[in-house]
Amino acid sequence: MFQEIDVLSVPHGIYNHKGIRFPGGMVLHASKQKGLVVLESVRDFARGEKVRVDRTKTRFSEDEILNRGYALLGRPYDPVSSNCEHLISEVLGTNEGSPQLRMFIVIGVMVVAGFMFWRPR
């Protein structure tokens, strides 16, 4: 049986930063600024930006999600292997990894390929 969990996101320049809503108005997220997984208030997570709420399905119970999230508190942040989307995927068991990272890699490869094959006439 699946249940839905709130995944929050806020714009941060060219990407969206994401976290999982936890009880008491808190958000679990991988903080680039602090360099690790933290639990912060929604206000601190948003940093003055508008928060978007997406309902995401998971096979885990709320207790399992909380336990999985609390177990990851303090884990070091890494933009390639342990960013906010990796955290959500791991806690919710979605196996999605980081779609935004994959998009940036594809765009980067296309730009490099364009420069390599573009020949001025």
Image: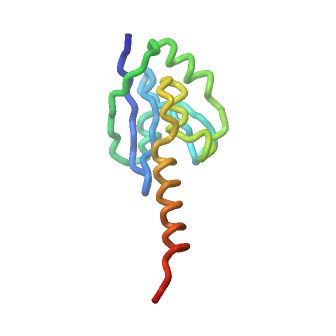
Q: Please name the residue shown 46% across and 35% down the image.
A: 19
Extreme residue in the bottom direction: 121
Query: Compared with residue 112, is residue 65 higher up or lower down, i.e. above or below?
Result: above
Q: Please name the residue shown 46% across and 47% down the image.
A: 100
Quadrant housing residue 22: top left
Residue 61 percent location from the top left of the image: 45, 12
Asked if residue 6 lies left or right of residue 84, the reply is: left
Query: Compared with residue 1, is residue 80 higher up or lower down, i.e. above or below?
Result: below
Count every numbered label the image shows and give the total. 0
Asked if residue 21 lies left or right of residue 75, the reply is: left
> Can you say which quadrant of the picture contains the N terminus?
top left
Residue 92 percent location from the top left of the image: 48, 24
Residue 90 percent location from the top left of the image: 54, 28
Q: How is the image coloured?
A: rainbow
- Front residue of 121/60: it is 121
Query: Compared with residue 30, is residue 69 higher up or lower down, i.e. above or below?
Result: above
Q: Please name the residue shown 37% across and 23% down the image.
A: 57
- Front residue of 49/32: it is 32
Q: Please name the residue shown 50% across and 29% down the image.
A: 95
> Can you say which quadrant of the picture contains the C terminus?
bottom left
Residue 59 percent location from the top left of the image: 43, 16
Asked if residue 103 lies left or right of residue 6, the reply is: right
